[in-house]
Image (cartoon, rainbow, N blue to C red):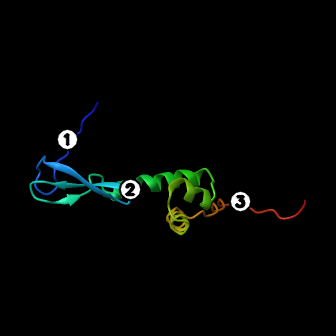
Amino acid sequence: MVYTQHYCAKCASDQIRRNGSSGGRAKYQCKACRHQGYFQPAAEEKARQYAQVDQLLLERNSLRSIARATGGARNTIAKRVKKSRGAGPAAASPAPEEGAKEVLGGP
């Protein structure tokens, strides 16, 4: 069995105990300084969830199926799609070469 030692973010003490949960995540409390908190920051979880959303978007899944798979809100995923479309390079048509003539019609 692997045991991971946790330390308080405020006082660096190793006197940590579990103290309930919120939103499905375990909360912990330091016995030395009474500081409460989570060990895994929410930003890491969101980054992981957004990476999964991006992968599912590449696979051309619908917004509803992505919402079911990731547990995110459909409107949040739709906003992410809009941001990703606006952030990418604009798809511009290539400029015609010098001296090239465009031929319309027949001979």
Question: Which quadrant, please, contains the N terminus?
Answer: top left
Q: Residue at x 54, y 69 (%)?
A: 75
Pick the front one: 6 or 18? 18
Give the numbered dot on residue 5.
1
Q: How many marks?
A: 3
Q: CA distance from mark 3 to mark 2?
A: 64 Å
Residue ID for mark 3: 100
Q: Is residue 49 above or below residue 83?
A: above
Determine whether label 3 and label 2 are within 8 Å by CB: no
Question: Which quadrant, please, contains the C terminus?
Answer: bottom right
Q: Residue at x 9, y 54 (%)?
A: 32
- Looking at the image, residue 73 sits to the left or right of residue 92; the answer is left
Dividing the picture into quadrants, the one containing residue 93 is bottom right
Q: Of the residues under marks 1 and 2, which one precedes in the sequence?
A: 1
Q: Amino acid at mark 3?
A: Ala
Disc 3 crowd rating (10 Å Cα; few below 14, some 14-19, many 20+) is few
Pick the front one: 28 or 105? 28
Residue ID for mark 2: 24
Q: Residue at x 74, y 62 (%)?
A: 101
